[in-house]
Image (tube, helix red, strand yellow):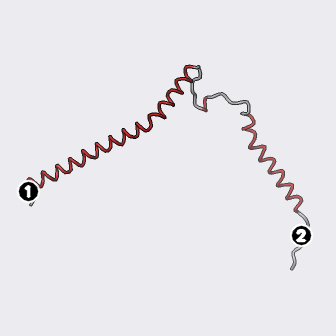
Amino acid sequence: MVTFWAFLRFHLLLWGLCAAWRVLRWTVTAAVLVAAAPVTLVAAIALAGAWLRGWPPRPPALSPPTPAYPFRIQRVPLLGQISTAIMTGWRRRARWPVTLAE
């Protein structure tokens, strides 16, 4: 049988553990924010400076294409054609009459 005082001590222990967990959680959160503050401040200052100079940051998908943009598109099929031509040339040269020894 559980006495009232044992019940009260158990609930106080649970309350203390929950309170300690809350304090630990807030402490870790504050430590992470303090550690990340210098990087965040530098990024915010750089963003503000760029914005004031007239350069609005845009995602790469919205930025205008570079002068080499068409070459990036054509490079892959061109390399495929070159490698196919090389491989078929080697296959043609490699087809000599082969006799199987029986």
Q: Amino acid at mark 2?
A: Val
* Residue linked to disc 1: 3
* 67 to 90, vertically: above or below: above
Q: Position of residue 80 (x, y in %)?
A: 77, 47
Secondary structure under tag 2 reads: loop
Mark 2 crowdedness (10 Å alpha carbons): few <14, some 14-19, many ≥20 = few
* 66 to 15, vertically: above or below: above
Mark 1 crowdedness (10 Å alpha carbons): few <14, some 14-19, many ≥20 = few
Q: Amino acid at mark 1?
A: Thr
Q: Nearer the viewer, mark 1 or mark 2?
A: 1
* 41 to 91, vertically: above or below: above
| Left or right: residue 25 compared with residue 38 | left
Secondary structure under tag 1 reads: loop
**Where, by quadrant of the figure, is residue 53 drawn?**
top right
| Left or right: residue 95 compared with residue 33 | right
Label 1, label 2: how many angstroms apart (C-alpha)? 98 Å
Q: Hey, which residue is sitting farthest right in the picture?
A: 97
Q: Nearer the viewer, residue 96 or 32?
A: 32
Q: In which quadrant is the C terminus drawn?
A: bottom right
| Left or right: residue 75 compared with residue 31 | right
Q: Nearer the viewer, residue 94 or 27?
A: 27
Instruction: Name the residue rendered at 61%, 32% in the picture.
Output: 61
Tag count? 2
Q: Position of residue 18 (x, y in %)?
A: 25, 47
| Left or right: residue 97 compared with residue 46 | right
* Residue linked to disc 2: 98
Q: Position of residue 92 (x, y in %)?
A: 88, 58
Q: In which quadrant is the N terminus drawn?
A: bottom left
Instruction: Name the residue rendered at 28%, 42% in the picture.
Output: 23
